[in-house]
Image (tube, helix red, strand yellow):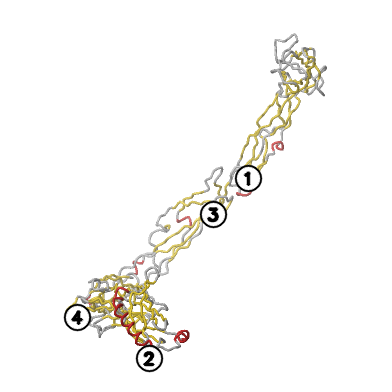
Amino acid sequence: MIKFRSLFSIVAVCVAVYMASVAGMLPSTASANNASQVPTVVTDKDDYMPGETVYITGAGFWPGEPVDLSIAVEGEDGTWVPDVDWTIEFADENGGFETTYVVPEHWADRTLRLTAMGYSSGLVATTTFRDSVTSVTINSPTTAAPVTVTSLPATINVAFTYVTTTPTPPVSVTAVITIGPPGNPIATKTVTGLPQGTQSLTEAVTIPAGTPNGSYQVRVEITHASGSPRSRNDTQNNAVIISVPPPNTPPTLTVTNPNITRGHLCNPTRPSTTVTVTPADFGASASDAEDGTLPVTFDDGSTSKTVTLTLAQPSATLTLKAEDSGGLVATATVTVTAEVENQPVNNPPSVTAQDRDLGHICVGTGNDDLTYQVTVAPADFNPVYSDPDGDPQAGPTTFGDGSTSMTVTLTLPEGVASQTVEVPVTLKVCDDPSGRNEPDCEPMQSLCGETTVYVRATLHRNNPPTITASNANLGQIVGCLVGGSFQTTQPISLEIFNASATDHEGDPVSLSIQGDLSELTFVGPGEITLPVTLVATDNPSGRTNGTCEPMTSTMTVYVSVQVVYNFVGFFSPLDTTRATIVKRGSTVPVKFQLYDCNGNQITTGQHRISVDYLSGASPNGTPEVTDAGSSNDNTWYFRYSDGQWIYNLKTNTSYVLNSTYIIRAHLDDGTTHVVHISIKR
C-alpha cells in the first residue's frame, strides 16, 4: 500500500538488502529486455470519491525487481506537484504487482498521476485517475417550506442542485427522487443520462390517488457512474404534507308538488301576468347525511321568485337548490303555469287618405333660406275610417302624435335649383270596442291604426345672376376743344369690359349697361377714369312655372382714357434725331407747339421743363434750369409766345464740357417729350 514519504528510510534499507541478494540472479540480457519490454500500471476505476480505496495493478517489469510508485497531483495552475505520496513494491516472478491507495479527503475533485518505475530495469509506466465528489441539495420542497396537497393524484415539482466531477470522457449521472419513508416510498422517479458538473434541475413526481394523509420526506440521490457507481443524497423530512378532506355525500331534495297554477291570462286583452312563488309553494324540503335539514332556495340563492307569464309562454320552469356545508348541491326542476281564458278579438282600425300637393313654390329668393313651411290639419288629407270589427271611431282623426294641427317644413337641398320635395305625415284613428266587451275578461282596449301620407311641393330657388367683367383702358386719345374744355367722346360697349353674366340655376340672363349708354365724354387733359354700371337680370319663369320673380345684379366697372395734346416739335435749333451740339454759356431755345384733334393750337396749360445729366465727363452737380428769356421769373415752366411754347435754357458752368444732357418737356396731359444736347467749349 502506498504511504507517505516518511517511510522512505525504511524502504531504502530494504531495497539495498534486496538488490544485494539478487544481484547474481539478474539476467545477463537486461539491456536487451529493457529495450523491448512495455510495462503497464492501471487502476480499477477512473474516478473516486474522497476516502475511497484505489486498487492498483502493475505488469511488464522484471521479475522480483523493486518498483518505485509515486503520486503527483495537478495543481490549481495546471502544473503537476510531484511525489506527494510514494512507496516501493516488489514485482512477482511474472514481473507484476498489486497494491492499494486511499484518496485523501483534501484532494477532492483533483486529477492524480501514478508513476511506476523499475529500479533494476528502468522501465516506467504511468496512469491518471480523479477524485470523484458528488453533492446534492434539495431546494424545494424542504422541511422549512413544505408543499401541501389537498387532492390526489398530485404532481410535486422537486427542485435540486448537484455537483459532480467532470472526467474526460464524460460519464453519466443518475438521479433517483423518492417521496415517502425509506424502503417504502409513495412515489419514485429515476432520471438517467444527466450531465456531470454543477447542475440545477426540477423534476415532476406524481403522488398517486389513495395515498394516506400525512407528512412525507423527499429524498434525492445522485449517482456518478465512473467505474463502479457512487452516490450522495439529500433528505428533507416533512417536505410534502398530504391533507385530502374526507368525502362528502350530496344532499337530498324532495318536491311534493312540482307543477302549480298561479295567475290568469286573458286572450288578447291580458297578454301577461306577474306571479311570485316560493319553494314552499312546491312542497320542497331538503336534508343531508352530514348536515341534517337544509334550507331550499331557487338556483340564484333567493327564497322567492317573481316571473312574468305571457300568452306566448304561459308556463315558466324554475330550478330549486339545496347546498350542504361541503359545497355539494342537489337541484330539482319545477313549473308554474297561468290559467288562460279567451275573449273577443279586437283588430285595429285603418284609415285611408290623400296626399296634399302644394304645387310650385319659390324659396331662397336672394337669400339662403331654402325652406317652406305650411300648417296642415288631418282634414286636409280627406281621411276615411274603417274597422274590421265594425267598432265605431273613438274621437277625431289625428296625427301620429295625437295632435290635430302640424307645421310641415319642406326643404330644397343645397345646390339644387328645382326639385319636388315631400314630407311624410302620419294620420291615426282609434276604435271603440267597449260595446263588445265580455264580463269574464278585462275590458278590451281601444286600438289604433295609422297610415302615411305626404305633403308635397315642387320647390324652386332663384338667386341673382353673377357678373364677370374687368376695367377698360382706352389708352391715349387726342382731345378736342369744345366750348372752352379739352375733351374726347368715346363709344362704350360691353365688349370693352369683357363682360359676361351667369345664373346659379341656369336661367337665361340679360346683360346691359345701366342707362343704355353708347358713349362717354372724358374732359382732360390727362388720365380720366369714369364709372360704368353693368346690370344683369335673369328670367326664371320657364323653370319655376312663373312662381319666382326675376333677380337683378349690378357691378360697377371703370373705363380710363388719357386725353392728350397733339405734340409738334422740338423746333430748331434742337434736333430730335441726335444730340444737338451747344456751346457752354449759350442759350438753347426749347420750342414746340400743341394742337387739339381739329388742329386748333393749345395756348394754355402748365408744362414743365427738366434737365438731367445723361453721359460724358463726370457731372458737376445737378445742372441748373434757368430761363434766359424775358419771363425768367417762372423758373421751370414753358411760356406760350408767338404761336409756340418756349423755354430759353441757359447753359452755365453747371453743364460739364463734353457731356450729353437730356431735356424733358412734361405736359399737363401726362405725357413727356425728350431731346438731347451735347455741351462743347
Callout 1: SS:
loop
Cα separation, mark 2 vs mark 3, equals 134 Å
Please report whichever mark, 1 or 4, sits nearer to the chain's N-terminal start.
4
Cα separation, mark 4 vs mark 2, equals 92 Å
Cα separation, mark 1 vs mark 3, equals 23 Å
Q: Give the quarter of the image for residue 152.
A: bottom left
Callout 3: SS:
strand
Within 10 angstroms of label 4, few (less than 14), some, or many (20 or more) residues? many
The residue pinned by badge 3 equals: 421
Please report whichever mark, 1 or 3, sits nearer to the chain's N-terminal start.
3
Whether 459 is drawn above or below 37: the answer is above
The residue pinned by badge 1 equals: 503
Please report whichever mark, 4 or 2, sits nearer to the chain's N-terminal start.
2
The amino acid marked with disc number 2 is Glu
Cα separation, mark 1 vs mark 4, equals 95 Å
Please report whichever mark, 2 or 3, sits nearer to the chain's N-terminal start.
2
The residue pinned by badge 2 equals: 93
The residue pinned by badge 4 equals: 288
Q: Which quarter of the image is occupied by the C terminus?
A: top right
